């Protein structure tokens, strides 16, 4: 499979190969979510919260309250879980992570504290009882459930989550609690799984396997994967990942839902034997093509992409398919940032042609953006639908058509965000 065909296959699978609808509504949003299968959640709001942007990239301007309703009110289109990193995913997809839920105590949330672990476990059970009375944020639930546990030291991000928050996150990882929605402060509103969606499992809270029920409460013990005695539905998850990716290497398939490579390999072999995955080679690399994946003859895409967009969140994959070496700069120390803080790849035609450092200044009503163009844009290799753009390129100038398309995309993004002005450097 040629790299060009693989790129077009990937763009089509990600919902970026067709024209945007004239008007985006709830049905449009559902269609995008069905295509991607997940939308990553992150607290950074330099432009807008990250889970909103993949829908804008594929639909253009759409009503954000409609997406909030689809994700935060019954019957929910998606629910939050550790499906990639933190991400919204279909409830039926979240149900496939039995192994991840059963192994929750491999990570110490506080239950393995040598002095306070038993009290932390009691706090978890008391929070479950409080959730039976109704949903709440960590702050609200802390007022309902008192405890005398000392707070822990800050983590490596400098955050200092309370014991109540840590206990709720443990329940969330275990699947004993879910998230009904995010409030206006982006805080999780926790609830029992049955109060969030009927398709969500609600496993009994355990701190170890049946033959060693205290395993997760011992200090300094490294617990193996699979200790919970349950398995993820790896075939179901790889099937969804392959459909969302179109063409992918084994490690890309594994990364989509953060499965181990061993899990992904077994599932990929089974799906290959069933004819659902087709082995291919792309640029000397072994990969798999989803049986139903389309390969358009040409793609004329135009989209700004969030750093957490499913097309680009696997950095190795976009380096392989697009020749785009991308670093997520929000976690990079300021003196090491090359292209800015919140760097959005710009897709034009079939290539990623620029990195756009963007910031929404809501107080000033301004979207500011600075473009850093890729060599393919300056060399005339990144025209719409694979055609070389018009304008000078031998001198290294960015063709006018690329600048015009990026300018139009920034204007639409600004309007969607309710900002009245764009300040951009696109040369």
Image (spheres, grey):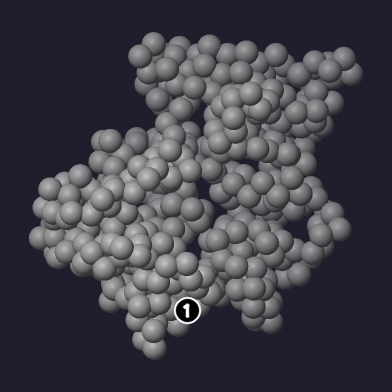
- Identify the residue at image location x=39%, y=84%: 212
Specify whether residue 11 is in view: no
Front-lying residue, 404 or 184: 184
- Residue 25 in percent (x, y) is at 36, 42
Q: Nearer the viewer, residue 235 or 402?
A: 235
> Which residue is denoted by mark 1 in the rendering?
227
From the viewer's perspective, is residue 248 above or below residue 383?
below
Q: Residue furthest bottom?
A: 211
Front-most of 318 and 74? 318
Is 121 rendered above or below residue 230?
above
Q: State the image quarter where residue 265 is shown.
A: bottom right
Left or right of 139 in this view: 94 = right
Please say if 397 is above or below 229. Answer: above
Of residues 201 and 283, the one drawn nearer to the viewer in this rendering:
201
Most extreme residue toward the front is 115
Residue displayed at 76% across by 32% down: 382
Label 1 crowd (10 A; few <14 / some 14-19 / many >=20): many
User: Which quadrant would the N terminus be assigned to in this image?
Assistant: bottom right
Relative image position of residue 218 (x, y in whole percent): 40, 71
């Amino acid at each position: 499979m040629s790299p060009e065909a693989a790129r077009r296959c990937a763009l089509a699978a990600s919902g970026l190969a067709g024209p945007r609808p004239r008007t985006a509504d709830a049905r449009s949003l559902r269609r995008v979510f069905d295509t991607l299968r997940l939308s990553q959640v992150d607290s950074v709001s330099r432009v807008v919260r990250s889970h909103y942007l993949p829908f804008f990239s594929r639909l253009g301007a759409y009503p954000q309250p409609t997406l909030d309703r689809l994700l935060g009110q019954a019957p929910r289109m998606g629910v939050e879980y550790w499906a990639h990193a933190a991400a919204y995913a279909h409830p039926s997809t979240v149900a496939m992570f039995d192994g991840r839920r059963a192994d929750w105590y491999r990570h110490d949330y506080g239950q393995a504290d040598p002095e306070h672990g038993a009290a932390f476990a009691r706090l978890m059970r008391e929070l479950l009882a409080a959730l039976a009375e109704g949903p709440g944020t960590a702050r609200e639930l802390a007022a309902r459930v008192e405890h005398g546990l000392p707070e822990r030291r800050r983590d490596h991000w400098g955050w200092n989550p309370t014991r109540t928050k840590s206990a709720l996150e443990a329940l969330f990882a275990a699947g004993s609690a879910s998230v009904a929605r995010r409030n206006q402060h982006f805080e999780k509103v926790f609830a029992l799984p049955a109060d969030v969606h009927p398709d969500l499992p609600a496993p009994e809270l355990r701190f170890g396997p049946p033959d060693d029920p205290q395993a997760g409460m011992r200090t300094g013990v490294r617990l193996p994967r699979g200790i919970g005695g349950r398995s993820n539905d790896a075939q179901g998850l790889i099937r969804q990942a392959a459909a969302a990716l179109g063409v992918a290497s084994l490690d890309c398939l594994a990364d989509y839902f953060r499965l181990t490579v061993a899990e992904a390999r077994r599932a990929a072999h089974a799906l290959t034997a069933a004819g659902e995955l087709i082995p291919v080679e792309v640029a000397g690399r072994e990969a798999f093509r989803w049986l139903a994946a389309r390969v358009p003859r040409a793609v004329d895409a135009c989209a700004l992409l969030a750093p957490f967009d499913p097309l680009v969140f696997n950095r190795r994959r976009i380096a392989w398919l697009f020749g785009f070496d991308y670093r997520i700069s929000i976690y990079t120390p300021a003196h090491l940032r090359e292209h800015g803080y919140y760097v959005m790849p710009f897709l034009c035609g079939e290539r990623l042609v620029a990195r756009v450092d963007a910031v929404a200044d809501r107080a000033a009503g301004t979207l500011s953006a600075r473009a850093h163009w890729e060599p393919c844009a300056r060399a005339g290799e990144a025209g719409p639908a694979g055609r070389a753009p018009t304008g000078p390129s031998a001198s290294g100038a960015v063709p006018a058509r690329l600048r015009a398309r990026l300018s139009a995309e920034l204007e639409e993004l600004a309007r969607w965000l309710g900002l009245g002005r764009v300040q951009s450097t696109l040369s």
